[in-house]
Image (cartoon, rainbow, N blue to C red):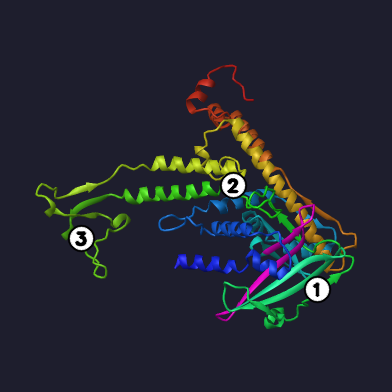
Amino acid sequence: MFEGFKRFWKGFMQMFGYTTLKQIVGKDITLSDKMIDAINEWKQMMNGQADWIADSIVSLGIEEGICREFADCALVEMETSLSNERLDRIYQKNISNLNENIQEGLALGSFVLKPLGEAAAEFVSADKIIPISFGDDGKPNDIAFLTVKKVGDVDYFTRFERHYFINGNLTIENKCFHSQTSRDIGLPCSLEAVEEWANIDPGPVTYPGMNRMDFGYYRNPIKNRIDGSACGVSVYESAVDLIRKADIQGARLDWEYESGERAIHVDNKALKQDKSTGRFSMEKLKKRLYRGLNLEAGKDQELLKEYSPEMRDEAFKRGLEEYKREIEFSVGLAYGDLSDVQEVAKTATEIKTSKNRKYNRVTAIQNNLYDCLEDFAAGLAFYNSMLNSGYEFSCKFNDSILTDEETERQQDRADVSMGAMQLWEYRKKWYGETEEQAKVAVQNPAEVIE
């Protein structure tokens, strides 16, 4: 059933292939088939449905962990507002769920925060965005959004909403398509075919004087090596193979525990047979006590024989932790963000370097998010006839990734001074020394904390 769902989902996405989209737009588009396939892969990974997930291999949720960590760090103590009180209330309401939506944007490479009239807005994920062309600033100057609605059992309606410029002025048009299969976008139809879309003007409608897009566009600060376009790339694209290895390693660890359950070999006659299948199956966990043993195979067989293999879980754990550290390095996280911080045998210099690496990546994300929110605010102002009213946009981020480490170090120094922490413990934590090395070092009377 699970495999069937994955095939259905892939088929559903195929209706938005490059050739079909090019025919709808009437010209070449930036979004290529390679990017469509990549977005599809990133989406499956984020949902725990990567191609390698099957049978005993389950997702460890590393992709979600990566996106959640970057989102939390980027938004922690973020302060943003608009100077106009009425506009600010609308703005704050619509960014209240920014964290969960930027996580999806980080996973799929980009997202759009688009006003829906005066008071409402929606987040549009990359799998529903059709970049047609980009300007020199890396922002889309011709873009379309897809909204799919299923009516009944076999009717699929797709709204194709396009935003572009005519003579430097924003223009919006809407088209509707109907199909009776999820594998084809179908034929053009009226927007009135769907009740919720009946009052939408198909256009094109041009807004004189509006020389910018009416939404905020966010793109991950990562070079696109999929097709070289300006389309956004997943924050974990560079670690796809490593995440696959980690998921497989996690399955090995699970199998080690499962296969290592203690059992006692007994004659098959002592086991109960499943009447429906005719098989002799073993119980799980605490009920798994007996295992079949065919005494008729040889006269010298033992009547009872304990099955208790040596566990190799520590070796599998070390391998899994190493994969996690490689993923942290690849995507720009700090050591210990995904891996077990107790297992990170790094010097203080290496730890600081990893913190700086993460800080640089988070700062780049914040810079792109700043532009997105500023453009979204302008879109809200446009729909509220306040674009030229003189409102001011404000957005500030902090640098807690670096300052938190220094604060923690100062606290540890205070703990050493008051006797709540041993000096050798401080050295072990901040100098990357072993317990033995730290204890030897503190024997030096001239030892001081730097």
What residue is pinned by disc 2? Answer: 238
Q: Is residue 71 left or right of residue 276?
A: right
Q: Nearer the viewer, mark 1 or mark 3?
A: 1
Q: Is residue 86 visible?
A: no
What residue is pinned by disc 1? Answer: 204
Label whose residue precedes the other's in the sequence (1 or 3): 1
At label 3, counting other C-alpha atoms closer than 10 Å, the crowd grade (few under 14, some 14-19, many 20 or more) is some
What residue is pinned by disc 3? Answer: 271
Q: What's under tag 3, amino acid-wise?
A: Leu
Report, in whole angstroms, how far the alpha carbon at label 1 lies from the one at label 3.
Answer: 75 Å
Q: Nearer the viewer, mark 2 or mark 3?
A: 2
| Quadrant, the N terminus | bottom left
Per the image, label 3 sits on a secondary structure element best described as loop
- Reply above or below: 346 against 29: above
Report, in whole angstroms, how far the alpha carbon at label 1 lies from the one at label 2.
Answer: 40 Å
Label whose residue precedes the other's in the sequence (2 or 3): 2
Q: Which residues are magenta?
A: 129-154
Q: Is residue 171 left or right of residue 423?
A: right
Q: What's under tag 2, amino acid-wise?
A: Ser
Q: Farthest left residue?
A: 299
- Reply above or below: 241 against 35: above
The answer to if 314 sits in the magenta stretch is no
Report, in whole angstroms, how far the alpha carbon at label 2 lies from the one at label 3.
Answer: 50 Å
| Residue 359, horizontal then vertical, whole percent | 67, 42
Q: Is residue 338 visible?
A: yes
Q: Tell me which secondary structure the magenta stretch mostly adopts.
A: strand
In the image shown, does 414 or 311 lie closer to the viewer? 311
At label 1, counting other C-alpha atoms closer than 10 Å, the crowd grade (few under 14, some 14-19, many 20 or more) is few
Q: What's under tag 1, amino acid-wise?
A: Pro
